[in-house]
Amino acid sequence: MKPPSFQSKPAPPGRILFLLLAIVVFFAFSASAQNDSSPAAPLIPVRIALQWLPQSQFAGFYMARDHGFYRDAGLDVTLIHTGPGPSSLDFLARGDADFATMFLSDAIVAAEQTELVNIAQLAQRSSLMLVGLKELGIHQPADLDGKPISYWQSAFSAAFEAFFRQQHVRPVAIPQHYSINLFLCRGVAACAAMHYNEYHRIYQAGIDYDDLTVFRMSDYGLDFPEDGLYARAALARQQPDLCRALRQATLAGWAYARAHPDEVVDTVLRESQQADVPANRPHTRWMLTHLLDSIFPTDADPAAADPADPAPPAGILQPRDYQATARALKNADLISRIPPYAQFAPLEGYTP
């Protein structure tokens, strides 16, 4: 008897296509699962010394930390607040911080003793001023001569010293710390102030603006860009990509702060409360608003923009601003030489 014949029928084309797709999906899933199981690169620990106590001045750093911009850049950032004691420069110089914020003028002066380089220029304009009381006879710079004047010492004094030398006045220097109470009590005839900070605090304390004489450093050719991010030159040479990553993430934090001011104010108030630093919402918002004008000067007043003298882009130290600041410091005998721009700002040409 002839055995039955079993002839296979060809599979329908649709079934073949289904099987092929299933195989492709399986291997794709397997590769994805294998990649997901591989360990992520460890974050690089970074310590940033901020030049003062918690306030809106550091909002971009808070936002970059809280919203993962530093983490996305591969950085595990620790923010260190300084204050009236050791400065951010002290932290950087003795190796207790990898990066530090400070004024451009102070960094140029410090560079004669410590190899510093600019990683990012945050505040492009000067907010620095001396505020005098008209009732104590302060109406013009010459009135400061021989008078008790409080101002910040150490790494904050360069612009004031340049101003005093320029105006040929020799006030009695009184160290100014966190509080402006000595000025409010008429213990000094004038005090140091930032437009975004102490100037508004004086008003909040009950002294009208009309009762004050204001000497804005920018009005006397001392329009030094202020807050910048600095590193030791050796670190910038050895790890330029790390410096660029930190710069870009910090600027992203400031861009976020500009777009979310209400959230920033809440965050700053929380940071202040945790550090037992007095703060209030109106002043915190005032400070943020005026700082953003300095960090993003192209957005401050588009109608007033001068095409022949454009505002610098965010984060970039302009050669002309550097040279003007350094020349003013040299003319005031605060530095003996001006470091080359390319040496002081090694990331020049990097656009975030």
Image (tube, helix red, strand yellow):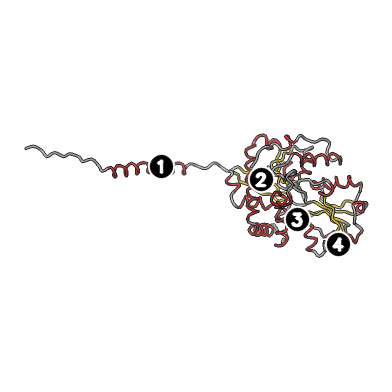
Query: Which label sits on residue 117?
Result: none
Query: Which residue lies at the image location 37% right of the left edge and 41% below the top edge?
Result: 24
- Residue labelled with disc 3: 196
Q: Nearer the viewer, residue 35 or 223?
A: 223
User: Residues under labels 1 and 3: Cα distance?
Assistant: 55 Å
Dot 1: few (<14), some (14–19), or many (≥20) neighbours within 10 Å? few
Q: Is mark 2 on a helix, strand or loop?
A: strand
Question: Residue 8's spot in the image, x, y percent?
Answer: 20, 40
Please tell me in which quadrant of the rendered image residue 236 appears.
top right
Residue 181: image quadrant is: bottom right
Quarter of the image that includes the N terminus = top left
Give SS at disc 3.
loop
* Residue designated by label 2: 47
Circle 4: element type: helix
Amino acid residing under circle 3: Tyr
Amino acid type of disc 4?
A: Asp
Of the pair 231 and 245, the residue shown nearer to us: 245
Task: Give the numbered dot on residue 211.
Answer: 4
Q: Where is residue 55 in the image (x, y as percent from the top left)?
A: 71, 55
At 60% from the left and 42% from the top, the residue drawn is 44
The answer to which of marks 1 and 3 sits earlier in the sequence is 1
Label 1: which residue?
28
From the top left corner, tell me how far across and down residue 217 is, in percent. 82, 49
